[in-house]
Amino acid sequence: MSTLEAVTMANNLFTVDLARQMNGDQNVILSPLSTIIALLLICLGAEDTTEAQMKQVLHIKNCRDIHYGIQDLMFELENAKEFKLYIENTLFVEETCKIANAYINSNVWYNSKPEKVAFRNAPRDAMEHINSWLEEKSKGTFQNMPETLISNNTKIVVVNTAYLLANWTQNFPKYKTKNYEFTLSNNEKVPIQMMSAQGKFNLRTIDDEKLRILELPYGAGKDLCMYIMLPDNSNDLYKVVENMSFEKLTSWTDPKYMKKKYTTVFLPHFEIESAYSMKDIMSSMGMPDVFNDTKATFTRISKDNLFVSDLISLATVNADEDGTRDVTNTDDHFGFLALMLPEATFRVDRPFFYVIQHKPTDCYVFYGTFQKP
């Protein structure tokens, strides 16, 4: 297995772990890749039990040259021609801490340098500085973190953002967007704007899981795609995610099991923006020492007593007629297909989850659930 393949597998294993940990009744959007990069950034400075816990949770315990692997993966993603993926990670560190030069130099893999802020003497100013960084890096999507996050005892706050610009291979004509009913997990029906399109799409039905899968590619090359995982019943989503494994998700998104059919697709018009405090989630997954002021060991960052106050993970996804964001349109129709009768209908009118995958590397870039408008 190459280093790139090992990094991708670690990311995809971590994706499933995160999905199950965050399984609930709310809409979710996160970038496992962005989160794992942020954690690897601080893992560079970890030692002893802290380092061992992080490597275990990130599935990199036996992965050599992990940081070079991340560099190779990001080169593939950042140099793609048909989509733009922006991932930013920064450590905000208390200004009185003396950061080791060796650690600063090692961050070349992540194009990131720790920023010093006055957590101790001016926590409000530090908060405003971080919020300004968030507004800039997220293209104005996110602007403010919870005020309770920062105090004069804060040592390190790690922030990561993920932002995608991409267009569907086949856009959804705007004139076809209409109001339909969406059935919530409690069987309540609510109105929602539903896009629709007809074309050849890859589909799969998994009877044992009571699950249908739709592949929605981006761009002419289709190197990036969104897989919609739609349970048969409106209240089945929690169970499907709870029972999901790495092997199952890998199989569900395997193109050799898909069948291309001329299909009428109905998809909710949705936009989800989220900012998560990952401290409790990461602690529950097996790395509590990272956030413990008496147990954390980050002596490769500084000889001062450091611990991570929180990891803030931010992501946004927008499924509209064009794609994830407003960029130049790609092909809007398939010409001769207008003369064909649809072989199938895929109506996403109940809770579902999705992954956005970079197919050349098999890397899951985003994961999300849609529970309600």
Image (cartoon, rainbow, N blue to C red):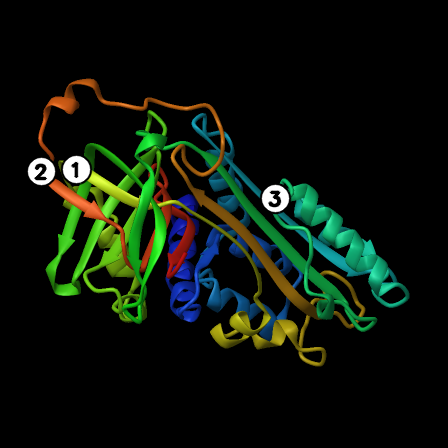
Tell me which residue sits at (73%, 64%) in the image: 156
Looking at the rendered structure, the kind of residue marked 2 is Glu
Tell me which residue sits at (72%, 70%) in the image: 148
Residue 94: x, y in percent? 82, 62
User: As rendered, which of 330 and 11 lies closer to the eye?
Assistant: 330
Looking at the rendered structure, the kind of residue marked 3 is Trp
In the rendered picture of this protein, how many numbered marks are placed on residues?
A: 3
Query: Which residue is disc 1 drawn over?
Result: 263
Tell me which residue sits at (40%, 66%) in the image: 17
Residue 244, quarter of the rendered image: bottom left
Residue 100: x, y in percent? 78, 56
Is 126 positioned to the left or the right of 345 in the image?
Answer: right
Q: Secondary structure at mark 3?
A: helix
Is residue 328 in view from this perspective? yes
Residue 22: x, y in percent? 44, 68
Query: Which residue is disc 2 drawn over?
Result: 343
Q: Secondary structure at mark 1?
A: strand
* Above or below, 98 relative to 272: below
Query: Which residue is disc 3 drawn over?
Result: 109
Q: Secondary structure at mark 2?
A: loop
